[in-house]
Image (tube, rainbow, N blue to C red):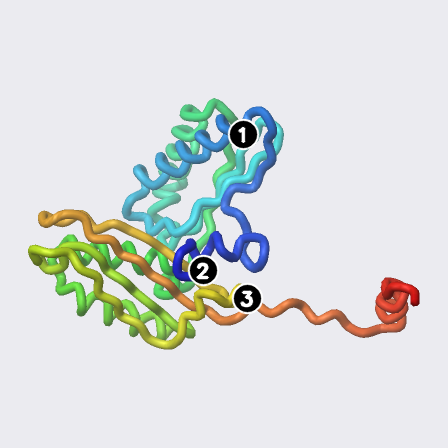
Amino acid sequence: MGRKVNPVGFRLGIINDWESRWFAERTYTDLLHEDLRIRRLIMRELTRAGISRIEIERAANKVDVTLHTSKPGIVIGKQGANVERIRQLIEKSIGKKVHLRIEEIKSPETDARLIAESIAEQIGRRVAYRRAMKHAVQQAMRRGAKGVKITLSGRLGGAEMSRSVTEMDGRVPRQTLRASIDYGVVHAHTTYGRIGVKVWVYKGDVMPERRPVTEATLSADLAALPAD
């Protein structure tokens, strides 16, 4: 099961949260397409800004957009000019009030999306794909990742037939629901065609919070037990 589904979607509602948080009944389709427009616009305007994740929340006629980036300086721009321009573009696109928030990613070496983007960029510059993969794995493990797996698929090195190559270090338990696994997919566009880059980063287990045992909790648990 863990091999066939997106590792982030597989854990939604268990240890992962949704990237779009809002509720709609009749206008669901319109709001969904609005979200897609916002994401496409941001990724198009900020291609070099190291955007890893875009979170969208809605309240009444206002939209809160949070950008998780490794390069907040590029996103904000000189005296906040760039972030204001992006905000105005989004407002013009969807016709609603937008509040834009920037959050910095402290460790981009362990972010799956940013690792995949870095490898895709290096492949586009004709860097040896094995070297790019090994370097990314070593960097992530050095920065505290418990396990990293990188898979490249396509006409690697300009070969006639497409194939897949995998580089892995540590362990990546994809079927364990409590395992915090970051996942990213990016396509590298080369003269030979498109090469897919998939990255899994295992950051450790997320354990449930332990409830302190007190008289109140103990009596509540006993009261919940079925009567004989």
Residue at left 18%, top 69%?
131
Horizontally, residue 132 falls left or right of residue 139, namely left
Q: Residues within 10 Å of mark 2 (few under 14, many from 20)?
A: few
Residue at left 59%, top 31%?
24
Position of the C terminus, as image quadrant, is: bottom right
Q: Looking at the image, which is closer to me, 82 or 177?
A: 177
In the rendered image, the vertical position of residue 131 relative to residue 112, given as above or below: below
Amino acid at circle 2: Met
Instruction: Say which label, 2 or 3, has the lower sequence index.
Output: 2
The quadrant in which residue 123 appears is bottom left
**Label 2 vs label 3: CA separation?**
15 Å
Give the labeled residue for mark 2: 1
Q: Residues within 10 Å of mark 3 (few under 14, many from 20)?
A: some
Q: Looking at the image, which is closer to me, 197 or 73?
A: 197
The answer to the question of whether label 1 and label 2 lie on touching residues, with beta carbons closer than 8 A, is no
Amino acid at circle 1: Tyr
In the rendered image, the vertical position of residue 50 relative to residue 216, given as above or below: above
The answer to the question of whether label 1 and label 3 lie on touching residues, with beta carbons closer than 8 A, is no
Give the labeled residue for mark 1: 28
Find residue 39 and name its label: none
Residue at left 26%, top 67%?
166
Instruction: Say which label, 1 or 3, has the lower sequence index.
Output: 1
Give the labeled residue for mark 3: 178
Res 46 seen here: yes
